[in-house]
Structures are given as C-alpha cells and as structure tokens.
Image: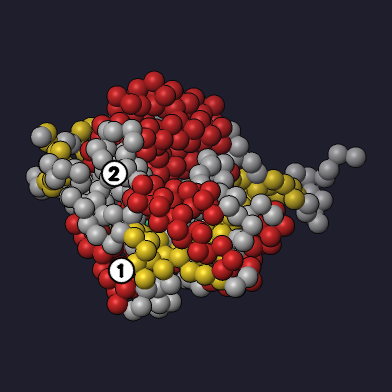
Amino acid sequence: MENAKMLIGGELVSAESGTRFAVTAPATGAVLAEVPRAGAIDVNRAVNAAARGFEDWYRLRPAEREAALLRAAELVAREGHARFLDTLIDESGSTISKARGEIAYTVDLLRTAAGEARRLYGETFPNDDPQRISMVFREPLGVVAVVSPYNAPLSLLTKMCAFPLAAGNSLVIKPSEETPLTALAFGQLLLDAGVPPAAVSVVTGYGAECGAELINHPRVRCIALTGSTQTGIAVGQSALGKMRRMQLELGGKSALLVLRDADPRQAAKIAAQGIFTHAGQICMANSRIVVEREIYQPFITALKAEAESLYLGDLRDERTVYGPLINARAVEKVLEHVREAIDGGAELLTGGEQLAGLVVKPTVLLEPPRNSRAWREESFGPVTSVVAADDLDQAIEFANDSEYGLSAAVLTHNLQWGLHAARRIASGAVHVGMHTFQSNALAPIGGVGLSGMGRSGGHYSTEEFTEVKWISADVGSLPR
Ligand code: NAD
C-alpha cells in the first residue's frame, strides 16, 4: 500500500490537515492506497491555482491547445494500459474488457475534443444603425469544477475534462472518493502532455466536504457534475444560489422496448448486454424492459437463459462479464429494491442473491408494482424489470412512466415503428435496433427530467462551457 498525493498547481501534495482516507478494491477489500482528505484550505489552493492557470491556458493559441490534447490522446494510446489498466480493474472493479474499452474511448474523446479547440465559432448580425457592427464571440468561462462519479472513472472523467479544456477553461477535478487513483493518474497525464500545471488540479476527498467546498468556492464559474440525481439536486441548488453555470449528468431508469417483430433470442442477448455490462453500474443501463405481449413468453425464457449463462469470475479473466458492485451499501440497496418488489407482487425470474464478495447475481424481475423502487428508482446494479404491453402505444406509455429520461431503445426491424417510438419517448437519446447503453464522442449526451440538464460531447460541450458575448463597434460610415 502506498500513500498517494494529490495534484495542486503541478505539485504533488498532502492535505493541509495531514488527514487521509483509504481506497479499497471492491473485488478483494484490499487497501490499494491512502489518499489526502482535502478540505477547504486545499480546495482554495487548487481553485486559486486554476484561476492563474486559466490565464496561461486560454492565452495559448487554439492550435496549441489542440496540440496538447492530441499529445494527451497519443500518450493514452501508447501508455494507456501501463498507466490505467490495473488501477481501473482494482479500484473500480472493472473487468479487463471494460477497462480496455474505457482506455480506447478515452483516446477517441481526447482526439475529438482536440478538434473543438479551433471551433469556438462566433457570428455577426445585422444592425439597423449603418455605422455600427455587431459581433458575437464565444469565450471560455474560467475555472470549471469537475465532480465525477466512480462507475467509468477514466472515460467519463475524460469527457468531463477534455471539452472544457479545449474551449480554454481551467479545471479543478474532484473525483469520486471511490476512484481517486484513476483521476490522479489522468491529471498527471494531462500535465505530461503539456497542459500548463496550474490549469488542472485534482483534489481528493469526500463529496460533502471537499466537493461542497469546491462547488461553493467564489472563483468557480461553472460546475460539471456527473453523479446521482440526489447529488445533482443538492449541487444544483447551491449553484443556482450563486448563479453558477452548471452541467448535470445524473441518474437514469432507461427503458428498452422489445416489439413483436424482434427475434426473442437476439433481443434477450441485447437486453442482457444493456443491463449486465459492468454489473448495471451504468447510467444508461436498460433497467426497465417493455415487451409486446405477443413475444413476452419466448423473450423472458431467452432472457432467463442468457442471465444464467453469464460467466462471473476473476476480473482479469477475459470471459468475466462483470464483477463486484462498488461497495457494501450499493449491494444492500440493490437487494432491498429486489426484496421490496417481490413483497409487492413481482415475480423473480432469476437472481436476487449476493454471490461471494460484492457480486450480485444477474437479476430479472417480472411485473414489479409500478410504485416500487425497482421500477421507479435507479438501483445501479445488475437488476432489470420486465413488463408486458398490449401494443406499441402502451409500450411507449410504459417507457414514459418515469421521472428520468437519459436513454431508451427500441428493438424492431421496422424502422417506421422504431422512429415513431423514438419521437414519442421522453429521453435525451433513443436508439433503434440496439440497447440503451451507447456512447459517441460527438453525440449530445444528457438527459431530461431527473436525468439532468445540459449536454456533453462534441460541439454541444463547447456550448456548455463557453459564454457568448455581444460586442458592437462604431465603424463610421460604411464603404460605398
Ligand atoms: P454520487 O452522486 O454519489 O457522487 C458523484 C460525485 O459527487 C462524487 O465525486 C461525490 O463525491 C460528489 N458529491 C457527492 N455529494 C456532493 C456534494 N454535496 N457536493 C459536491 N459534490 C458531491 O454518484 P456516484 O455514486 O459516484 O455515481 C453513480 C451515479 O452517477 C449514478 O446515479 C449514475 O446514474 C450517475 N451517472 C450518470 C451519468 C450520465 O451521463 N448521466 C454517467 C455516469 C454516472
């Protein structure tokens, strides 16, 4: 076990208070490291550094910011496995394939974001006064507080950092207390790639102390949070009280619709991938499945077989589909949701038990009560609920029976039905012919309702992390 330090203004430092907390491996319970438990003084240092770093970074030419992000992408492509693979597996309980996937997506995100550095487009608009011209500039905001979750600690953090950086902002990162080691390695990588040391700091600590200090710091101009809806509401209320810009990517309860023309076996395979990848600890996981009655029976038979065939072994074994949940609280929450649904009348198709350690069996509930937490709330574990619908209209109605709206999907070969459903489902994204868990560095990722506000990815991030400014000038009489 080592004592890690945090990264403030390019220096590796301990917390001013000298306190630390342990980071444990969910798969084994082993302590991987102790990291500084940052408080107000540390956060203040990091934000002040970032305020200075903003000047260094924003004044670089767009091509220089682009080059630094491209160098970061190349570093991840070359050294990503050495720098991140073991940490991702040990710290977040990722399987080796999920960890590799995160590293590959990180390269893609950094390359995509690099291009955005040159695309801070403005505009002009006509003025009735012929002597004046009006221009609109897009400018970075300043210090962005990046508060990130544990489930995809590298790729999500990259998305949250690379686009605001491309636009010229500086960052103070507060990673999840479960996964600070990945974030510290990522912060170091950005500095190695040539981002000025003051422009990126990583403070490690708990949400309610370090996180709260950061989002309330007077010099923070914008808050980018990916996390639970509960945290999003608390952070959003604080941010609004100080008129901060915010971009909130929160929880989901995504519905997968299986229409009557789908092949039940293929649909079950896709549905299982969409919920059981990373043990369902994915915001877009299809934790609700709505099936047209005509194929309900063959579909649930196939889904049961699929769930029961999943290999759950060592995280470094290529065959392992998923590993442990992040901690004992997460296991307890999932099992509570399952128990409550069964008590309310749901049928347990399969699963519902804890295996060794923090691993929960692939679990499928049938027809849970519509007021149960298994149907209404995010379980964030390997559990999904299946309900039958009489027809497409009712399937859409059931999909919309949620306060969340992050992603949805429709399995059908009939594109017309698929697009009809896609237009009517209230969600930030709807995918036809695949499951709900889809990523793309250019796509506008984000949700409606309790799933958050704002979008990230490609130029949508640029819009979130910049402010438009109207500049007008008296230019005298126009040339004839
Ligand atoms: P969480 O809400 O517990 O924590 C997220 C981050 O917020 C952590 O860094 C935490 O320390 C910090 N935090 C907590 N309370 C805070 C406070 N009062 N002030 C400031 N910071 C605070 O979420 P988690 O358990 O780490 O992650 C899982 C959640 O994230 C799930 O709900 C999942 O759906 C969501 N998520 C959403 C997306 C998306 O794109 N919409 C992506 C990934 C994860």
Q: Residue at x 37, y 35 (%)?
A: 97
Q: Nearer the viewer, residue 386 or 315?
A: 386
Q: Is residue 465 above or below residue 425?
A: above
Instruction: Work out whether mark 1 precedes mark 2 in sequence or the reverse, and give the earlier one.
Output: 2
Q: Residue at x 48, y 26 (%)?
A: 70
Is residue 424 visible in the rendered image? The answer is yes
Tell us which disc is closer to us: 1 or 2.
2
Is residue 447 visible in the rendered image? The answer is no
Amino acid of disc 1: His
On residue 312, which mark appears? 2
Q: Determine if the C-beta at disc 1 is less than 8 A from ligand 1.
A: no
Instruction: Tell me: 54 left or right of 327.
Output: right
Q: Position of residue 1 (x, y in %)?
A: 10, 34
Amino acid of disc 2: Leu
Q: Position of residue 261 (x, y in %)?
A: 64, 57
Residue holding disc 1: 337
Q: Residue at x 35, y 22 (%)?
A: 79
Q: Nearer the viewer, residue 260 or 459?
A: 260
* Badge 1 density bin: few <14, some 14–19, many ≥20, Cα 10 Å: many
Task: Tell me the quarter of the image containing the C terminus.
Answer: top right
